[in-house]
Amino acid sequence: DAKTTQPTSMDCAEGRAANLPCNHSTISGNEYVYWYRQIHSQGPQYIIHGLKNNETNEMASLIITEDRKSSTLILPHATLRDTAVYYCIVNLGSARQLTFGSGTQLTVLP
Amino acid sequence: KAGVTQTPRYLIKTRGQQVTLSCSPISGHRSVSWYQQTPGQGLQFLFEYFSETQRNKGNFPGRFSGRQFSNSRSEMNVSTLELGDSALYLCASSLGSGPGANVLTFGAGSRLTVL
């Protein structure tokens, strides 16, 4: 699996967009980018995933660069409940095994 | 739609004992995966079951085992418990095929403390 690099921590003001970057420069052509988050003491929660195109769902948007070497998860209007550790994972779609790194601790400030 | 249910939520064991944890996946999900989370090692993959067969296994000793039943419910067992087995054990279910294989729904976890 491709290795990912994320900042250790980020702050965001409530109501503003939170942009979480992820570097995956060694990603291969058939690997997907997945984002999960884990709110303290809960199980991880799936957010979104993509292969090449930008994706949007009710939770977030995923922007993948054209060379696919990096991506950004966007929470359009962050709330206090979005405070969590966010994990960027690169994986074959059929891998059935997720490798979680250290993630980014996002703190949404009032 | 009910989520992934794990039981028990909390348990305390002593070294040398064994423990069995249970997981009921989302209805229709045929794949169940188990993960261990500790402060030092983070989230680590234990194993994955699909249609009662272990399809994938992480790098854990043989003391960690699991099984899946015909109704997709799964159990994991840890024998001869060690202090280092104290962790949050998370179960996740998925449809089990295609890109959706990695779209996991996690349970709340079973927090094991080994004394």
Image (cartoon, coloured by chain):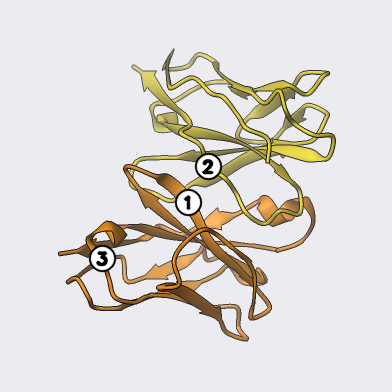
Chain colours: A yellow, B orange
Co-location on one chain, circles 2 and 3: no
Label 3 Cα crowd, 10 Å radius (few <14 / some 14-19 / many 20+): some
Query: Which residue lies at the image location 69% right of the left edge and 21% below the top edge?
Result: A70
Residue that numbered label 2 is attached to:
A100
What chain does mark 3 sit on? B
What percent of the width, then of the height, locates residue B18? 29, 78
Query: Does A62 appear above or below B29?
Result: above
Give SS at disc 3: loop
What chain does mark 1 sit on? B
Amino acid carrying mark 3 in the image: Glu
Report whether residue B33 is seen: no
Residue A21, quarter of the rendered image: top right
Query: Which residue lies at the image location 52% right of the left edge and 66% below the top edge?
Result: B2
Residue that numbered label 3 is attached to:
B82
What percent of the width, then of the height, locates residue A82? 45, 30
What percent of the width, then of the height, locates residue B74? 52, 76
Number of the front mark, 2 or 3: 3
Report whether residue B9 is seen: yes
Query: Which residue lies at the image location 44% right of the left edge and 51% below the top edge?
Result: A43
Amino acid carrying mark 1 in the image: Gln
Label 1 Cα crowd, 10 Å radius (few <14 / some 14-19 / many 20+): many
Residue B6, quarter of the rendered image: bottom left
Label 2 Cα crowd, 10 Å radius (few <14 / some 14-19 / many 20+): some
Co-location on one chain, circles 1 and 3: yes
Furthest-bottom residue in this view? B70
Give SS at disc 2: loop
The circle on residue B57 is none
Q: Are marks 1 and 2 in contact (CB under 8 Å)?
A: yes
Residue B79, quarter of the rendered image: bottom left
Q: State which quarter of the image contains the N terminus of chain A.
A: top right
Residue that numbered label 1 is attached to:
B44
What is the distance, in whole Å, between disc 1 and disc 3 at their CAs? Answer: 17 Å
